[in-house]
Amino acid sequence: MKLKKATAVLSAVVLLGMQALPASALSVSDMPETGILSEEPPMPETFTIQTETMTFEGYADYNSDSVTLIKCDASLTYIEIPAEVTDPETGITYPVDYISSDAFTDCPALREITVNENQTRYQSIDGILCSADGSELIYYPPAKSVESIIIPEGIKKIGMNAFRHHPAKEITLSSGCETVLNYAFGESLEKLNLGESTRAISFSACSNCKNLKEITVPEKNYYFSAEDNVLFNKNKTILYVYPSRKAETSYTVPETVTEIGGGAFICCDAPEEIILPEGLARIGGDNFRQCKNLKTLTIPEGITSLSNIGNDCENLETLYLPSTLTYVYHIFSRCGLKDVYFNNTQDYWYNMSNVRSTAVLTYVTMHFSDDNDYIRLSENGIDYRVYLDQAVVMGCSPELTEIQIPEQVQNVPVTEIHSEAFRNDENLKSVEIPETVISIGYSAFYQSALERVNLPEHLTELGASAFYHTNISEITIPDGITDLNGGMFCGCENLKLVNLPANLKTIGANAFSHCAIEEILIPETVTRIRWNAFQNCSALKEITLPESTAQIEDGVFQNCTNLKKITILNSACQIYDSPGTICNAYSEIELPPEGCIAEIEIHAEFSGIIRGYENSSAQKYAENQGYLFEAIADSENFQSGDVSGDGKITILDVIAVNKAVLGKDTLSETQLKAIDFNQNGKPDSEEALTVLKYIVGLIADFTA
């Protein structure tokens, strides 16, 4: 066995602080051809200290000299914040410098918080936890029950979660209280009175106030105003809070408003209609969530971005979206939507940033300005999007194990299976696709339970990763497919038999990686095989790449443990010069970095033979890697019956002849010589039959 060791210094470097894209955002087709992606920096390692009633946390990786109180016992009615705490395992004593905003979340019985006299960061004012200087109210114990609370003078800031668990129905901020942080108030609050000096309120300060009815603001406050119990900034250009229990069934936002703050309309039960002004320029996230009686909503022209808007509005049926939208994400999920009107074209909608991630697409009737509308439809458990002239399959009921897609629904042909239509379907095992389908979108059957599927003869588009990690065992790809996109059959561990299309030009990255393919006939039209295309195909023993193959990228036959012979018939084929391009075993070792450059040492082994012509690129590659090379002369290129040129006569040669007879493939001059037994200068069915007879042993040779 020949061991080839190579060391490569990668030009792509990992810089401190750089974060990788999440896997879900990066498809195989988007991956770079060379280089590496950085991993997210690891989270710092923490240690915990557990006392009888409290849990503390520190960060070991940063030589922590203090700890944070993160949790208290749920049964506590009284607690004293210590100045320090000792780790019983190490004996090290740490000062308690911080208290998590969630430390008292599970303490409904807590009625008093005191502070150790040696604690320098916090103090207790009448049983309430405050900062050491008394300017911030950090936490008001929930069992210190007072229905109406007046914030003491001297408090300038209300901390995160300060009253989140308190049953107070009315809270009045002192005249000097300036700032209110996130989630400051709780579910029981019905009335909030701001102070004269209140100048900053987090958009989410009242997002948990499901019973809020009234908001008042003193006239002397220079920063805020209230109109009809709705909170605005002073000049009413920003709407901050619409009380959840405000009783009106219709509300019109004032024309002066140009921005609606995040979470301003949340859990608003009463409104059936909210009318937004024409001059509105921004709607913050988490708006119109759980507005359970909202029936119709019009987003005005000028709005360009919607993110996390309108979710869980169970009675929302009609939505109007502006032509100015450029970005949408996670909008109006789990709603009762029936009709969505978009004031722009269908093409614009589908080219919009991130539009495919929003649930509003699949199960509603969409109306576009170019009248290219579609309706939602479900028949026999199959979901469709139906246009005037075609229908698109969007998915099926999760309990179905097999489906037969019809040629028509609503008197229009079914022409497409939508991207991700059956993604992660754990039950679907068999799909019959009609001949009317010409397009299957990316990730259509991604990681589904699919075992059997047919591809229609007229199919012309097959999206990347369409059958990624499915359970199919055989597939015939129709001749209309000229490029096999990345990740197409990646991880199909049961896939043994593949018939490639006659006009195929490119085999995409990771197209067949981790498959069970034992042999495969590469058509004479293939010019490029992308990186890792057959990586980890452990059952593959031999393969021949035709004269047309001009490029073999990195890792194409990497870690093919049983590959014994590869024949490369193009003398000038560009082969990526790395031992990992063709090998039986492969590993990488990361060496200690010098500066910001990561150095990778590659170990690869190949015990098989690379066949090619003398002085060819195949010979050069083999010699560079220290692999065995076997030269083939022009006259030896094909033996009688061996159309594939792999040195043996198998059913693949019969298939190649039949394809040529049917006009689905063209034989080269040397291939034709290998089977032109009757010397008529063209392939015919009799010659295919002769090869088959030889394979099954009915004849001993090809002599007349």
Image (spheres, rainbow, N blue to C red):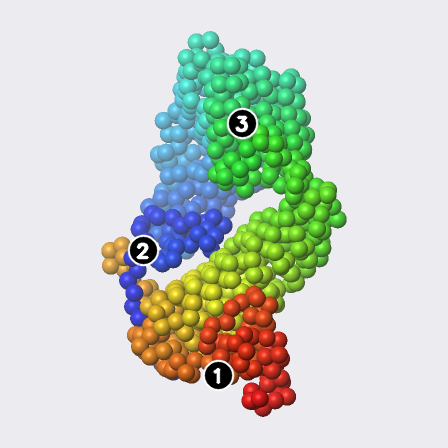
Q: Nearer the viewer, residue 614 or 317?
A: 614
For the residue carrying disc 2, how many other residues have a C-alpha within 10 Å: few (<14), some (14-19), or many (20+)? Answer: some
The relative height of residue 84 versus residue 272 in the rendered view (above or below) is below
Q: Nearer the viewer, residue 401 or 127?
A: 401
Instruction: Place residue 432 in its image quadrant.
Output: bottom right
Look at discs 1 and 2 and give the one toward the viewer. Answer: 1
Quickly name the residue at label 3. 322
Which numbered disc covers residue 426?
none
Q: Nearer the viewer, residue 15 or 266?
A: 15
Q: Secondary structure at mark 3?
A: loop
- Where is residue 286 shown, x and y percent of the image? 53, 31
Quickly name the residue at label 2. 12
Q: Secondary structure at mark 1?
A: loop
Quickly name the residue at label 1. 639
* Residue at the (52%, 28%) spot, across then down: 323
* Residue at the (56%, 80%) spot, across then down: 650
Disc 2 to disc 3, how far (Cα)?
42 Å
* Residue at the (47%, 72%) spot, across then down: 668
